[in-house]
Image (cartoon, rainbow, N blue to C red):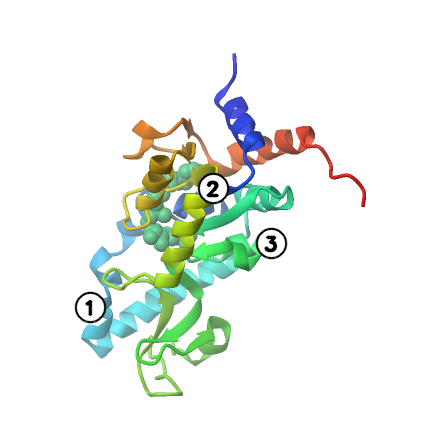
Amino acid sequence: MDTPRDSLVARLGNARRIAVFTGAGISTESGIPDFRSPGGVWERFDPNDFHIDRFLASVESRRRYWQRSTEMYEAILQARPNAAHRAVTRLHDLGQLGAVITQNVDGLHQRAETPAQRVIELHGSTLHVGCLSCGWRVPRQDFQPQVSPEGDAPPCERCGGLMKPATISFGQMLEPRSLERATAETRQCDLFLVVGSSLVVYPAAGFPMLAAQRGAPLVILNREPTPHDGYADLVLRGSAGEVLGPALDALEAHSVPPLPA
Ligand code: NAD
């Protein structure tokens, strides 16, 4: 009888354009906590502190925001991509990846060498800083040294506006361009693979539903049940790297190498 992993390998093998949709769960094996699991971010921080209104409210709340963000940024810099991030790159190398649609802000897909143009960061990136007034963006590594240990960050050097890590906070709009690209990839894919997401944060969690409505097979790999499991074609319970690493080994073993030019 086929195991769930055999079924996963068979589905990956049949697909030509896979949309991989990732959440914080793909990065826990790299040591970055997710939000909702035990030990996750919500056990340490008040979600309201991540709301844009809180950031705008006062100098003091902005200091707190920058201090927390700095802590997360430093943890992200220490982290290394894991077997699951590498598996996504391996799908790309096999010519089967349409795009990665990620809710993560840690840049680990790119550091695993999935080409940046294939990674759609729905919730922005911790690795950049942007001006809330004029939209000017700078790499975080150039800006971070100017942030004091107390959390004081300098204003935008172009317009004097407030500088904020380029992640989408609660209450902020997602970038229309990212939403458009993610929608197009979801419509074009012939397999939609969810990895490590609780699928409760919208609008991101609407993409698996859109894929299923369009008739693309939906596969969900997550440690815990999600609200979308009921209409998935295949649900795998397990750790992302432990499942995807061996699945890619099997896929590569069966893949036909391209003919020499
Ligand atoms: P979430 O915390 O709501 O859900 C993560 C899910 O992944 C959980 O259901 C958990 O059971 C599962 N999981 C944890 N480790 C796993 C593993 N190794 N293998 C398989 N499944 C695993 O996170 P979410 O769904 O991404 O949504 C919440 C928000 O969290 C997103 O908006 C994202 O921006 C933000 N976030 C990002 C990071 C990051 O960039 N790494 C970290 C924390 C939060």
Nearest the eye: 162 or 19? 19
Mark number, residue 189: 2
The image shows residue 136, relative to residue 112, as above or below, that is below
Nearest the eye: 96 or 234? 96
> What's the distance in space between the residues labelled 1 and 3, CA to CA?
35 Å
On screen, residue 81 versus residue 127, left or right, reads right
> What's the distance in space between the residues labelled 1 and 2, CA to CA?
37 Å
- Name which residue lies at 46% across and 47% down: 27
> What's the distance in space between the residues labelled 3 and 2, CA to CA?
21 Å
Quarter of the rendering containing residue 124: bottom left
Question: Which badge, 1 or 2, is on the more N-terminal residue?
Answer: 1
Dot 1, crowdedness within 10 Å: few (<14), some or many (≥20)?
A: some
Circles 1 and 2: CB distance less than 8 Å? no
Circles 1 and 3: CB distance less than 8 Å? no
Question: Which badge, 1 or 3, is on the more N-terminal residue?
Answer: 1
- Name which residue lies at 32% across and 29% down: 231
Say which amino acid is labelled 2: Cys
Secondary structure category for the residue under label 2:
loop
The image shows residue 226, relative to residue 26, as above or below, that is above
